[in-house]
Amino acid sequence: MSGPVVFNRVRRSFYLDSVALMRLARELAGQAGVDEAALMIGSASNKQVLADAGLLADEGRSAGADDLVIALRAAGEETGRNALAYAEGLLERPQTGADEAGTWRPKTLASAAEALGDANLALISVPGEFAADEARKALKAGLHVMLFSDNVSLDDERALKAEARQRRRLLMGPDCGTAVIGGVPLGFANALPRGDVGIVSASGTGLQEVSCLIARGGCGISHAIGVGGRDLSDSVGGIMTLEAIGTLDSDPATRRIVLISKPPDAGVADAVFARVSQSRKPFTVCFLGLETVAAPPNVRFAPTLRAAAADVVGENLTPAPPDFDAAAPSDRGWIRGLFTGGSLCAEAQVVLKAAGVPVVSNAPIPGVAASPAEGAPGHVLLDLGASEYTVGRPHPMIDPAQRNKALASAMGEREIAVVLLDVVIGYGAHEDPAGEIAATLAAPADGPPTVVASVCGTADDPQGYDHQVQILEDAGVIVARSNAEAAEIALRLATG
Amino acid sequence: MLADRIEKANREAVERIFAGDPVLLDVRPAADVIAGLEDRVVLHAGPPIAWEAMCGPLRGAIAGAAVLEGWAKDLAEAERLAGSGALAFHPNHHFDAVGPMTGITTRTMPVMVFENRAFGNRAYITVNEGLGKVMRFGGNDEEVLARLRWIASDLGPAMGQAIRSLGGIPLKPIVAKGLAMGDEMHQRNVACTGLTVRAIAPALARTMGEAGKLATILEFVSGNDQFFLNIAMGMAKALMDPVRGIEGCSIVTAMSRNGTDFGVRVSATGDEWFTAPVEMPQGLYFPGFDEVDANPDIGDSTIVETVGLGGFAMAAAPAVAGFVGAGGAAEAIAHTRAMYEITAARNPAWTLPALEFAGTPTGIDIRKVVETGVAPTINTGIAHREAGVGQVGAGIVRAPLACFVGALESFAATVGAT
């Protein structure tokens, strides 16, 4: 066997772009036993390049400017001939197109808006320090804004909302996790039928619970507009709540309006009711934590999220309340609520507080004591989505690990009679939160407490309402039809 | 408001680019037309650089030019001369000129003269030497110098005479056609070279007496697919210079590399260069060469990206995207789309069929570059790192972001932003 051999092959009257040829040459040179390879059109300058590289043989020298030279240096005769055949195969190989959509993503709001052409809403989820700038750009471009980001200053919020009002655009947020506009769920939201009920909400899971109960009660949603948790405070003055009410009031597809918030500051409530009183549409208002409030005649007040939904659809939720034995004496003890939704935790406090039992929470409603942490004695309802649990971690609606841990721990505490849970499904939420709970409950425990839960979601959600309920029931969980009902069942189990 | 002031200034900038009317006017010896190009002055690509900091191909080209000009009798003497401080080195950009790769311009070299008829400014660039071993890639042997002498004695005067007889050749229509024919004017100039030959050949035939010489010239120009590159560069320089010095304007007026540093100039900050070390191109190599042979990025040719061609017009020349990545047409389109993110406007005169005839991305806004972190895409040739070897490949390179960050800081101070 002698040393390396140079092989040339010429394809007459053949043209391919030089970059394509260089790519093929690189592939050919990667073949075992091939030292060097080139595919070049046989122009004089190219043949010089081949000669300088020691790749030009007699056959290649005969090529003209309309011919292709395949040139290579290989370890031996057979390797070389095989490599030439391989190169011919490369030239015959059909090309497959790449998917353009997979290669380009807009980097800026401006180019995204331009690429879409008729977009009218921007969902902004960037770190808080950049969020206000992006929101300003979007408003300036004529877009409505859902500002998912948190950590936006009050000054920025006020300024952005004032600008939005002036431009007649919605500025939903900051820290707005949920909205459903024109049937399109944004952020954490559920698959809802279209209908004639409009919702304005300063609360994400409050909006989800009410809209899902309305959907499961057979009605639909026109738009559900989030306004951000601080909108009804004195410092923001309800700017966006008033704008959203105005939007829904003038929307012919909306026939009644539900307003959801934690208790507003007094002056702001007056302004909101002043606007509501100008409307001819009926309003249902739930200021979660307030039992009643003086309101105009077209307003009915609902103390809980369930009551707000029932005011729209009546009490016809799921067919029947769950079966459970409220008389079991071993159940007497404390309730430990482990919530992923802040407003669901607040609603459970409303239920317990109304029953006159003492309750503490890390996110207390008016009249409820603040508890420092889990593990304290008494009825404890914890919002695991509060900032003390989520710094540096994903929200428990996305990643259930924190709640799994708290649940496993609660299941081993002898003083706890009932563990109360929410299970929030829909877009943005974990793909199988019920499964996570079931897996956690599968661990053997000594005389475990009873677990009561409700599923906030609809049949059309990706996780499937019925499927999630089934998983929970199979795991021995009592599944109520609403969060408020779950709290009531927990109360009866724990206190008899 | 500051943002409005900048927007207004940037609109003015792109309107000047769009209003430009660049014409190839003449070919003349450099010393006759470039003011201040004295004896023993060497113009080079990129921002200013001292001999000690120059890369191999740039030194090699300077040595070759010193022999060509008769300043030294051989390359060894030329190197000593260059290192002794006896030669003055200046950027082409400081003399209304540009040059590809090493970009060497000296007194006796013929330069093409461009006039932007809308603004009256002129720009200059040498005639493209062809492919293979050439001075722009650091080639400097007798073959290289002999070709340059022929360009000075035959090609330059003949081209000048023919172009003058035509009253100049308007360039925007040629580029518009070339974009539709698969050129992006940096890596791909086949169509525009052909269109230029078509424009000039009858005039050459009429103005030249000798059929043999005519044939040699037509052979030389037709046999060089990159002949139009220098024309595109001179045209781009003529288009961009009227944008210099607009108060409050954050548009890039020049990008350029000397093989060591990448330099950027911005309208509002005038003639200041913002520099950062050049990057290595990613690409494909000629047989016998690979990455270890490659010189870092070099040349004034990034003026074509500055005006919205080259890497910015990649969608026109899908094959070029194949230097990196999978090489699909979709990738080429994605390159151009990314450049829309960092530019102020789309050129209505230069459209891209593959993008539904959208205009080329025009007016690089340093604010957008820094905001998005998207650096300009540049299509480029790759020189051997040693003097005298020549081109070893071609590929794609990014402008270093640090230039734009530095430029933005200085721009902010210039416009009084805090």
Image: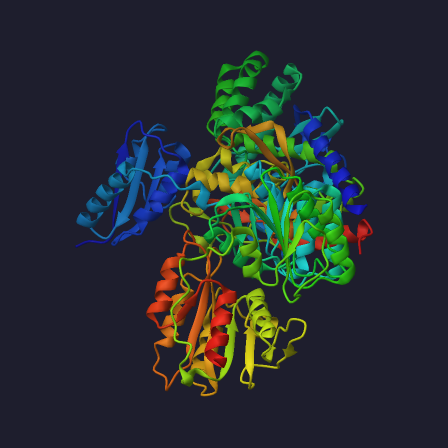
The quarter of the picture where the N terminus of chain B appears is: top right
Camera-side residue: A192 or A27? A192
In this picture, residue B211 sits left or right of residue A236:
left
- How many numbered marks have been drawn onto this rendered protein structure? 0
| Residue B45 image offset from top left, x and y in percent | 63, 44
Camera-side residue: A311 or B357? A311
Determine whether B383 is above or below A384 in the image. Answer: above
Q: Quadrant of residue A471?
A: bottom left
In this picture, residue B415 sits left or right of residue B187:
right
| Residue A303 image offset from top left, x and y in percent | 61, 63
Determine whether A468 is above or below B216 in the image. Answer: below
The quarter of the picture where the C terminus of chain B appears is: bottom right
Q: Residue at x 64, y 15 (%)?
A: B165
In this picture, residue A143 sits left or right of residue A98:
right
State whether residue B336 appears in this view: yes
Determine whether B332 is above or below B21 in the image. Answer: below
| Residue A242 image offset from top left, x and y in percent | 71, 49
| Residue A54 image offset from top left, x and y in percent | 33, 46
Q: Residue at x 64, y 71 (%)?
A: A365
